[in-house]
Image: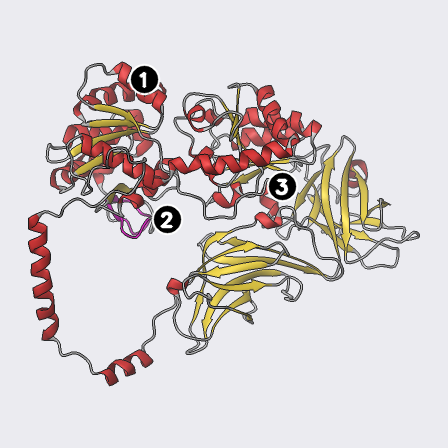
Amino acid sequence: MQNAYGIGGTIRSTFNVAGALAARHDVEIVSIHRTGGTPKLPLHRKVKLVHLIDTRAETGADRDNGLLQQDSTLIPPVEAKGAQFSALTDKRVAEHLARTDADVVIATRPGLVMYLAEFGTDRYLKIGQEHRIYGTHEPNIRAAQDRAIPRLDAHTAVSEADAATHREHFPGVKTKLIALPNGVPPSEVEPSDGNAKLVVAAGRLIPVKRYDLLVKAWATVAATRPDWKLRIYGRGPQQAKLREQIDKLGLNEHVRLMGPHSPIETEWAKGSIAAVTSREESFGMTIVEAMNCGVPVVATDCPHGPGEIISDGKDGLLVTNLDSDAIAKGLLKLIEDDELRHAMGKAARISAERYQPDAIARAYEDLIESLGGDTGTAPAPAGSAPGEPRKPAPVPLSKVLRRTAGKLIRPLRRSVAKPATPTVKAAIKEIVRKPLRCTASCRVDTDGNIVVSVDRKGLSGEKLSLTVTRRKEGKPISVPLKAPADGKGAYTAVLDRRELRLGEGRWDFHVVRGDDGARRRVVSHLAEGRGLVELEPLPGSPFTWWVAYPTVDGFLALRAWNRKQHAEARTVRQGNNALTVEGTLHGAQFTADSKPAVVATPRIEAASTVTAEVTVVNETAFTFSLSYADLRHARGGDENTVWDLALRPAPDAEPIRVARLVGDIVDRNKTDIYPVIDGIKPYLTVNSDLAVNCPAPEGA
């Protein structure tokens, strides 16, 4: 691989299939570059990961190697630049391919295919992979790869259509050209129930994904069904253009750019529909990932992947490629038909099973056997089903002799050291305890409580408890951690939102062992928020809301809000002359003679307070508008002026901050973005409170 320390689709697929192959084989992943301490994606413990060049900041042994600055003599410039191939990669890859004792070597991108063809030997099978589409490479890359492919034993494409294209371009070559799709494991998250009014898209924000067509289509969807929302996950060079398009179409309350998220499965499961609008897709891992989560996909019928993955009308919809109207029509079809949407979601989960990594691993074993390689498993019996377990092949006599010798020698080695007496063993066990290694997942149950499941593998000792500790406070709150009834499952703790009172702020999870007081922070595996998307706050006061999330360094944390009263900004609309907010009041109610008002309090003394009337819709619902002209008039001269918004339910009542807290999003200031209109820009603070900014004029 070029770099195993990223989060791309090729890395995910390679890790998935390598893990499945490791159940029956010795598997090694060779990362040309090492740019991080540990991989960002999970890798099976039996898969060995090595690197050839270490360019980690500050610690990388090769970061100052002069050969990194010299051009590769083998790889075309465009490929070399994109994959950071250099004279040093030429040298290190050649050395590795000369000394490896592998039986099979697989190259995962064009430059590596070229290396394998040039430096590979006949001691092992040489297999190349194509993760894009034949005709999409830059001409020099395509030409170099075309020269390399006939020198391999096999070359795989991720779709049958692209494999057929390869066979057309290489008539008569001995290289076996077949389709082997990417491996996508079954989802561990709670599948979508298809009820949330949410469409999800995910992938790199690059031109080929055509998210601009999706945003354009959503303008049509929002006009018909404004209650549905669209989320786009990912990052990339198109982000600024997409933001500009969303602002121009006035879709800020309808479309959210969510940024990257890993693992993405927790976000697919929040949606009821997935959208894939690419101009072309070599495979479409995002399609299978969404289907694994029980989410039907509306995808453009582009070359090549979607049409081979989706059964149109059964487990998803295929719509005309590059047609925003067709995309909107397909989305609305599933939005308007609850029964069809639910049926497709169930069918999608079943359809996705054929891409499970073990099935793809079996296909690789079949390919290797067809090339004359030894996979260590007996051929599948005639008539057996695809993926059916095969009996191990007979063990060679040499291995039998080695194993027998080992059984005789190992006890002799162990007998050299005098075994500890039972008393000494017990004493050592009493003094030295296994360290805690705590990994947990969490999800929201039907009552809105957060259920934390701690993996039992990292736990030891008695009297275990889960604690939550507010940062900068250091006073932990303990929650019982119950052992699994069967002794095999996870330990569980429930954070009951009706009973547990957590102060406002960010809280960290720890497991504490009562025996010796050992305390270990909890690593996040899956922080599922599906249950929060449609959840409503509990009635009464105080208002409380929790969102569990993984920190940037991978630990499980909780964002808590706790307020005596709260005014939730459900909708923020930017008109031509005023900012209008529709919301709900929590922990208080309006009365017939309330006479509520909204108060915009400036953060600088030079500016003035702005007030406006609040229209009461019912006991808890309200709406108000702030005039742009009034805000500009109240600004502090030419200074940048920010107002914090609060609702005063009655003339003598305490103001209640207006904020957007309800839902599954931790940091609204990163996702709920609004443009400047007529000199006024609403925004959400780091605490998700609603504020209004009147920027200073340019040059002031």
Spot occupied by residue 226 in the image (x, y as percentages of width and height):
70, 33
Give the residue type at disc 1: Thr
**Which of pointers 1 and 3 lies earlier in the amino acid sequence?**
1
Q: Position of residue 514 (x, y in %)?
A: 46, 77
Q: Position of residue 642 (x, y in %)?
A: 70, 46
What is the three-letter code of the residue carrying label 3?
A: Ala
Q: Residue furthest front?
A: 383
**Residue sitting at x 44%, y 65%:** 486
- Which quarter of the figure has residue 406? bottom left
From the viewer's side, name the closer residue of 144 and 72.
144
Let me know if residue 140 is in the magenta part. no
Q: Amino acid at mark 2?
A: Pro
Mark 3 lies on residue: 196
When the figure is inspected, residue 597 is found, relative to residue 122, above or below; the finding is below
Whole-number angstrom distance, CA of label 1 to CA of label 3 = 41 Å
- Label 1, on which residue? 165
Secondary structure under badge 1? helix
Is label 3 in a helix, a strand or a loop? loop
Residue extent of the magenta highlight: 44-60
Label 2 sits on residue:
42
* 10 Å crowding of disc 2: few (<14), some (14-19), many (20+): few
Q: Secondary structure at mark 2?
A: loop
- Mark 1 or mark 2, whichever is nearer to me: 1
